[in-house]
Image (tube, rainbow, N blue to C red):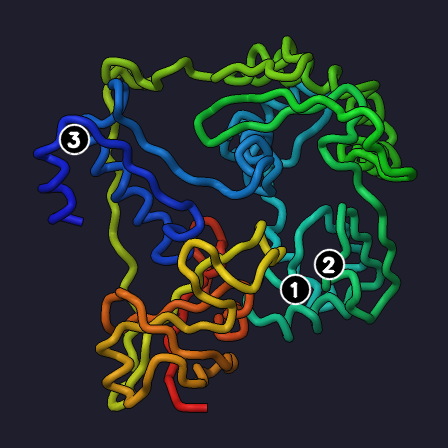
Amino acid sequence: MLAFARELAEADRAVLVWSMGITQHACGEDNVRAIVNLGLSQGFVGREGCGLMPIRGHSGVQGGAEMGCYATALPGGVSLTPQSAADWSEKWGFEVPAVPGRTAPEMLDAAADGELDVLLSAGGNWMEVLPDPAWVESALERVGLRVHLDLVLTPQMLVGGGDVLLLPAASRYEIPGGCTSTSTERRIIFSPEIPGSRVPLARGEWEVFGDIAARVRPEVAAAARFASTQAVRDEIGALVEMYAGIETLREKGDQIQYGGRLLCEGGVFPLPDGRARFSPAVPATPLAPRDGEPRLRVTTRRGKQFNSMVHELGDAITGAQREDVLLARADVDRFGLADGDRILLRNDHGELAGRVRVVELRAGNAQVHWPEGNVLLDRHARSPEAGVPDYNAWVTVERA
């Protein structure tokens, strides 16, 4: 990072781009802080040709996060505190709990302990996105009733155990009145309904959630249900300052960029003195390999896929196949292997069969595809701040 900083110091323009998945899963929020600190130290904020660009997940992730679709946040990206809960209680007219809800891994912990009677999963594919798939399956089997609301069939729907109810969800292209998505560059973009695209019986998730809330808490029914997606946008525009203007989006191509074209233009930040703040970043101590046992640090990568749905067995960018284990030449020679050899990666959590593919990579590391590599992950290893699982592991290597 220091060497990178010295190189940047000689540059006049730069955009620092990072994957939220890679940085969070690799070494936690401290890595993100380090990247932001680096950008601030070089003045790469609020100027033309510069910026900080976190690459988020699929469409809906950015906007969902900013609308409070996390158990730990409120609309506008506001942290959940007693004061923020009280503020939103006043806005909505009903009490908003100040206690955070469970994250997805925490829900599975509760399911495994027999504490969940009902689980509603909207989208998601826990069998293929979380560590230790066998344990995930056993946890899901302990839930009395599972309701899956989704566009496609996923493996978690086929898990046995209690009762399972499958509900078809409408895609964004089937929503009467259209909807919006937010890009990672802060553009709120209107997505109109495509005529003739509706699937019979499929409903928008926003309608289903409203109906459930109204049935569970009849006293908030009027606030939980909306007549249309336009009514939803009207409320967002009125209550979430950063999203003001969303209520005006009605046609294909309509969009707004909150914060303007440049955030913190001229180096003026939205703080009392107008100056930015650096955040302490203390990198986590990496797990050390066992003495006398040759091991590799494995990270997971993506191929030709959308989230957990794999579209092709080969990656058009790298040429790698799903079963390939990407290794450095030095490690291939160290283990007495050759390009194309069948190998096994093992650790205390599981094993993964694959095939050697020699690539340009730092020695001591290996890469496997996700979600295949989830069998090697420790389900207990999570970010202490966000609860995000660690998608890295130490493994031994042997010829298959």
Residue 268 location, quadrant: top left
Residue 366: x, y in percent? 35, 71
Q: Is residue 297 visible?
A: no
Label 3 SS: loop
**Tally of numbered tags:** 3
Q: Nearer the viewer, residue 101 or 58?
A: 58
Q: Nearer the viewer, residue 168 or 72?
A: 168
Q: Earlier in the sequence, mark 3 or mark 1?
A: 3
Q: Earlier in the sequence, mark 1 or mark 2?
A: 1
Kind of residue at disc 1: Met
Q: CA distance from mark 1 to mark 2?
A: 8 Å
Asked if 146 appears above or below 244 in the picture, the reply is below
Kind of residue at disc 3: Gln
Kind of residue at disc 2: Thr
Residue 73: x, y in percent? 55, 36
Asked if 67 appears above or below 168 in the picture, the reply is above
Q: Nearer the viewer, residue 299 or 29?
A: 299
User: Residue at position x 23%, y 37% from top?
Assistant: 37
Label 2 SS: loop
Q: Is residue 376 left or right of residue 309?
A: left
Pointer 3 with pointer 2, Cβ within 8 A: no
Q: Which residue is mark 1?
A: 127
Query: How many neighbours does mark 2 have within 10 angstroms: few (below 14), some (14-19), or many (20 or more)?
Result: some
Q: Is residue 211 visible?
A: yes
The label on residue 42 is: 3
Q: CA distance from mark 3 to mark 1?
A: 42 Å
Residue 258: x, y in percent? 47, 17
Q: Which residue is mark 2?
A: 154
